[in-house]
Amino acid sequence: MKKTQHAADQPGDENTVSERLDAALDRRGFTTRPLRVRAAVAVVAVTAVVAGAGVFLADNLTNAFGPDSVCDGTVSADLLNDVLGPGKVSDQAFGDGHLRSGSAFCMAKVSSGVFGNERSVTVELRKNSDLSVVANDSEARLFAASANGGASGAAFDHRAWALLPEACGSGQRVTVRADRGERPGAEKLAALAASTADRIASQQGCGTSPTPAPHQLSDAGKDRDLDRSTVCGLPGLTMPTTPGGPAFRETVTTATDPLWACLIHSDANPRSSITFTVGTEPRLLAATTPKDEPGIGRARWVKPDEMTTTCQGRPTYFRMEVNGFRDLVPDSDSAWKQFLTAGAKAIGCEPIL
């Protein structure tokens, strides 16, 4: 059956649209040309307001008109939005403004809405020469270079760090810390730290190819009662009983690359602690010349609480720091020998003693 066309849609009726518009304006009282001109102006004005509102919202609720990167080109705006949520991206630099120099830091910001609703992370390039800076990272989720395309570092819900590529030398790491109590999550912060490390490496002229975002992170470190017969889960590392003393806990990383860390602590004395740390990734610390004095086995002193040796031909660092709880470590020399022996086995190192 042939479909019947509406009279108003008959082909050849060229004036249909204008006639219908005239009729609509007549019904609303726009019967003269001046009135109809005013109506047209009003329509254009409303359209402009709507378009302007769209631009305003896009500019205040997204980064549609914002920069692709901030902090001297080292922080990706897309990754920053992924970490802190949608909004307009900006920054505030401190020091000389160049993160690659190692003498500056930058606050990368995201704001949304007319009242700001600002969130931020603080980004910095740090140069480290000893394990004290990571000794308290026993709760970290670690990502190893061997499993993450070269990316290496550690992450928490509120902060992360990633090492610069090997060609940039050792001891350089990017730190990212969420401000104002934000907890974006370990995976997102690890990705931002690794990306920023890549960008800084490129600016330093030592970046070769982009490192993929870390995708394989270890579980967070485990907190448990201190086992004095197998301290920190290391067979052979022991501590004496202390009758009448406080209850102790130990927090231990669940992986050993780029580091292994254990923190012994007690709620009865939160300012005291004992830490055992092993740095297994050569990039972790700047090369240090051992002291010209007797060591322990193959290990040599580099600082009062730290020793260096090689494991499978790679520089490896051991650190034991006792801040209180001296009754748990009555003999430092004996504790060091136990730690070097047990720690070496845990990371697959040939015997040190």
Image (tube, rainbow, N blue to C red):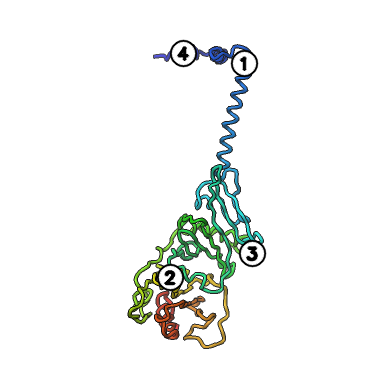
Q: Tell which tag, 2 or 3, sits nearer the viewer.
A: 2
Q: CA–CA distance between discs 2 and 4? A: 85 Å
Name the residue type under label 3: Ser
Amino acid at pointer 4: His
Find residue 289 and report its horizontal and vertical position in percent.
58, 80
Label 1 with label 3: CB-CB less than 8 Å: no
Residue 12 is at least partly visible in this image = no
Foreground mark, 2 or 1?
Answer: 2
Q: In which quarter of the image is the N terminus?
A: top left
Q: Which residue is drawn at 63% across and 65% down?
A: 103
Q: Mark 2 points at which residue?
A: 270
Q: Position of residue 48 (x, y in %)?
A: 60, 30
Q: Which amino acid does label 2 sit on?
A: Pro
Choose the circle earlier in sequence order: 2 or 4.
4
Identified at 64% across, 14% down, the residue is: 33
Q: Residues within 10 Å of mark 3 (few under 14, many from 20)?
A: some
Query: From mark 2 to mark 1, how far is it between C-alphas?
Result: 80 Å
Q: In percent of the image, x 55 and y 39: which residue is there?
A: 57
User: Which residue is disc 4 drawn over?
Assistant: 6
Q: Residue 101 carries which label?
A: 3
Residue 128 visible, this angle: yes
SS type, badge 2: loop
Q: What mark, if any, has residue 35 been given in the picture?
A: 1
Q: Please, which residue is most extreme toward the bottom here?
A: 294
